[in-house]
Image (spheres, grey):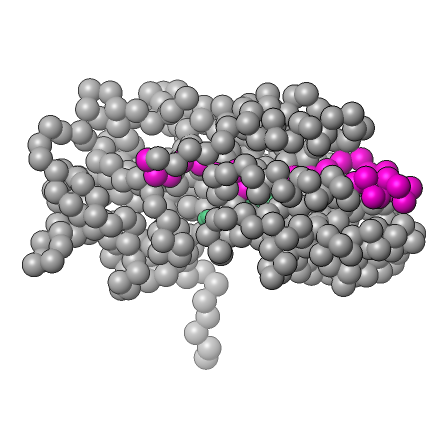
Amino acid sequence: MNAFEYKNKLLYVEDVSLQELAEVYGTPCYVYSKAMIESNYRAYERALSQWPARICYAVKANSNLAVLNLLAKLGAGFDIVSIGELERVIRAGGDVKKVVFSGVAKRSDEIRRALVLGIDCFNIESTAELQRLDAITKEMDIRSNVSLRVNPDVDATTHPYISTGLKENKFGVDINDALEIYQKIAACSHLDAVGVDCHIGSQLLDLSPFQSCFEKVFKLVDQLLDAGIQLKHVDVGGGLGIRYEDGEQPPSMQQYAEVLAPFMAGRDLEVFIEPGRSIVGNAGVLLTRVEHIKNTADKNFALVDAAMNDLMRPSLYSAWHDITAVEQTDNKKTSYDVVGPVCETGDFLGKGRELDIQEGSLLVIHDAGAYGFAMSSNYNTRLRAAEILVDGDEVHIIRMRETFDQLLANEIIPD
Ligand code: LLP
């Protein structure tokens, strides 16, 4: 499905016109489609239905309470990387018993709180973390499930900043050391080794790195069985990419499951998966208005009211997001660099985009539902954008635009 479509030359999200949303709620704002999030979630559910499976949505991709609440109602578990994310999950009505806690440097206070709240499983990333968890569980006398995140040394062939499964990356333990670490876990009085975990990177458009990763991880599962260690689940991480640019063809959830199938055959294991981007990425857009058109000798700039602080991905990863005008015309298009008001040359949302626009036109930055608002900041003392969730013809404001009072509330001028 696609929830963002032109009707009578105006862009709609489900049954609501984006022009109307801009008029009522102002710009910049993030707009999400409930139906699209649901459809992405259901596609995972269908693809994995042949096994016992838990979809642990990666909260970091989009952590708005309404989005988490929607996924909780659909039955999702959650992959968290901080205690803040766990507090969100709980406030959104998520089930703590379906939470896995990932991350390379969990603080002791975070571990304690997660134990008290009763999460399902810690994805341990080092022996140092194991020692810390062992000590804390003994001291608090609370048992906990653990899964070991292994680093399979597989090249995800994605942007280097979001590639995580190579030996040189900070994530997980060397898969060759895993057996020894599982033996250490077996000796910890309050820990139960229930799973193995991996996550090789994000925005993967090719299935072969997943295949290589599964080969190594399931070989380890067999080695563990030989050593008398029977796991209950394999956590395959997240990472499935989405289409940002024409020509990109991300594999479907079904195709992903087909790669996993031979490895799962005949095993008494539950699959955990930690998708973020592929659940919310194409379900959201950033809506922005053109403040000025500036034509120079070299270039035409569309100066818009959204900036790198609202959507960092283009500046940080040179990421491409489609940009279209909310109003379609038959006029000739001109090439524009779409840039924000922030005082940096790196503040761009897209370069060389063919558009027919003028001052006041509305633009949509597509596929911004994942790692959009979640990575936004207040740089240049810009208020963070509003967020809106559309459900058919119903509009829900799910985050009010920030106010200056909120922004400055924690700052103190000493006497
Ligand atoms: N599990 C773990 C342990 C992760 O570190 C991540 C993402 C995920 C799951 C979810 O991956 P996904 O399905 O969303 O690819 N800010 C970057 C992406 C960073 C991803 C970090 N880890 C971007 O905007 O592209």
What is the total number of numbered labels drawn onto the structure image? 0
- Do we see residue 69 in this rendering? yes
Q: Is 107 positioned to the left or the right of 356 in the image?
A: right
| Residue 406 placement: quadrant | bottom left
Q: State which region is magenta.
A: 221-246
Q: Is residue 119 visible?
A: no
Foreground residue among 274 and 254: 254
x, y percent for residue 6: 26, 24
Could you tell me residue 317's position as x and y percent? 40, 54
Instruction: In this rendered view, identify the residue nearer to me: 123 or 181.
Output: 181
**Does the magenta segment cover residue 230?**
yes
Judge left or right: residue 310 versus residue 264: left
339 lies left or right of 281: left
Left or right of 98, for residue 44? left
For image coordinates 82% across by 51% down, the residue present is: 179
Q: Position of residue 318 (x, y in %)?
A: 36, 53
Near-viewer residue (128 or 62): 128
Residue name at image x 61 percent, y 31 percent: 259
Residue closest to the far bottom:
415
Q: For residue 47: magenta?
A: no
Name the spot of residue 99 as percent of width and height, x first: 69, 40
- What residue lies at 50% left-to-right and 38% top-to-bottom? 206
Q: Main secondary structure of the magenta part?
A: loop
Q: Quadrant of residue 360?
A: top left
Instruction: Decide: is 79 above or below 140.
Output: above
